[in-house]
Image (tube, coloured by chain):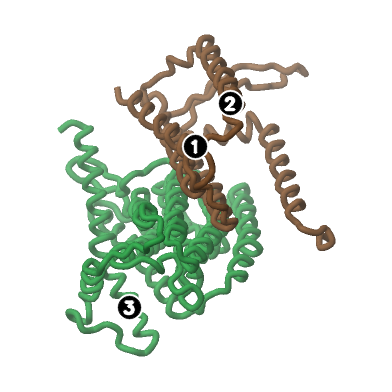
Amino acid sequence: MSPTLAAALEGAAKIAFVWACVLGAVLPNLIWVERRMAGLIQDRPGPNRVGPFGLFQAVADILKLLMKEDVVPMYADRLLHTVAPLILLVPAMTTFAVIPFGSTIHLFGRDISLVVADVNIGILYVFALTSVGIYGLVLAGWASNNKFALLGGLRSSAQVISYELAMGIAAISVFLAAGSLRLQRVVEYQASGTFLGFLPLWNCFPQAIGCLIFIVSAFAETNRVPFDLPEAEAELVAGYHTEYSAFRFGMFFMAEYLNLIAASAMMATLYFGGWSLPYLHLTGIFGSLASIAVFAAKTGFFIFLFVWVRWTLPRFRFDQLMNLGWKVFLPLSLLNLLWTGALVLWGVI
Amino acid sequence: MTAPFFFWFFAAIVVFGAVGVVAMRQPVHSALFLLLSFFGVAALFITLNAEFLAAVQVLVYAGGIMVLFLFTIMLVNIRRTAGQPYVHRQAGAALLVAFFLLAVVGGTIVASSRTSGLADAPADPAKLSTTTISRMMTETVDGKTVKTPVTEQVAGNSQAVAWGLYRDYLLPFEVASVFLLVAMIGAVVLGKRTMEHVD
């Protein structure tokens, strides 16, 4: 088999694996987890009728959305109203390409790095894609020709731009420590030693502030509670997706969940050692399989955190949101950068 | 040979987008065509193996600047332009300026490609995956400043860009950022309706 063909097959297999996991396993279960968790936290059973423990609720939800009528408002910008959910969904689906989901596995006489595309711009790719996804929200809001939708779109653009900055600067500190933008390298760096002699070299320890900023900003970037102002139902009906129905509405939800999964995976990768375990270096084929499980467990924890916070905290006010982003997070993230730079300079990390 | 095909394909997208910006009546549509043009430029960067520049192009122009454009366009609610004539009175003058600009830019490209052989740049991507940068290294030997040409291999183009900005062209880079700061402060001051509230 020629090397080009082998590389192509390897790439295709990895893409199939990642999408099968994300779209086939995590996404439907996430819908179920979110609704059951809501029930648990609000002291009610939650959906428990479709299948055992209501496990097939997601299937029922999706089927319902597929069969509803797709309404386009009369005075909407028809083309943009139609493509806006796609603009949001496509970047959300392609973010996973650069996230390493395991160490290197030795199969069929090849060393296969468990990441779809280990490009040397790593996180910049993720940031670039998320900043494109925002057009989906803005255009959905504008094209609907509805004042609530427009306000939702405007809010989301202001919010995402504000928090992207602090998030980006927090991420810069990570690459300063790892010395590379390549995400596989970032994970290998965190697996490579200890911090202060006893803690694992996970970035969440030396860069605790950066880690906190990244996590909170991720909530704002994914429009989740407590920062879900673009779709604040008490003020804006449903915000940017007020005029959407049927599966186009479903696409907005799918994109939100995909972004949530991607953000969780990024938190695990950048700050919590990705697929690596502290103090242990697992080798061999079982070590590689274990690394996938470790990565899944860490990502799963952050997904759980997103759901937990959603049903626990109230929503911010818009001026509070802007103050937090610009007056607190931006200076703090710069401080974190300075601190990390000093640690690198002194050779502590 | 796929490189020329991709170049022409993305170049066509850039030009198509640029024409769309001035041809559309609805300002939001114009902004979206500008976005398309930006993506074309990013794709051209990728065909040149400059992924870093491509990512920054999308991140800064598409993700930052254009979102703010859209934000402003949606907020100010520009009046309908449906009844306006398609060709403006200043069309003749604009054409003249455009031709002059084309002549200057085109002339420069032709002249420089003749002297430095830019037109026959290597099309082999394998050669470009590590960026070779040439620079003049300035050293002080026995009180005299000696300049020696150095060629270095850099692992990725993010490093190459960093070396260019923060070492070789540090002063121009810092001066440019001070200018930007001045412009920003100026905009804030002009944006204030009354000066009494400025402390």
Q: Colour of chain A?
A: green
Q: Chain of mark 2?
A: B
Q: Which chain is brown?
A: B
In the visual, does B88 lie left or right of A247? Answer: right
Residue A193, position as x, y percentages in the image: 46, 54
Secondary element at image label 2: helix
> Where is residue B168 drawn, in percent x and y?
63, 29
Label 3: which secondary element: helix
Q: CA distance from mark 3 to mark 2?
A: 64 Å
Residue appearing at x 26%, y 60% in the figure:
A23
Same subunit, tags 3 and 2: no
Please give the residue where the numbered disc 1 appears in the rendered image. Answer: B53
Dot 1, crowdedness within 10 Å: few (<14), some or many (≥20)? many
Mark earlier in primary sequence (2, 1): 1
Q: Is residue A170 visible?
A: no
Q: Nearer the viewer, mark 3 or mark 2?
A: 2
State which chain disc 1 sits on. B
Residue under numbered circle 2: B92
Measuring 68% from the left and 37% from the top, which residue is drawn there? Answer: B176
Residue in front for this viewpoint, B129 or B61 = B61
**A110 or A182: nearer the viewer:** A182
What residue is pinned by disc 3? A35
Give me the C-alpha separation between circle 3 and circle 1: 42 Å
| Type of amino acid under label 2 | Gly
- Up/down of A127 relative to B50, above or below: below
**Would you call the spot at circle 2 few (<14 residues within 10 Å), some (14-19), or many (20 or more)?**
few
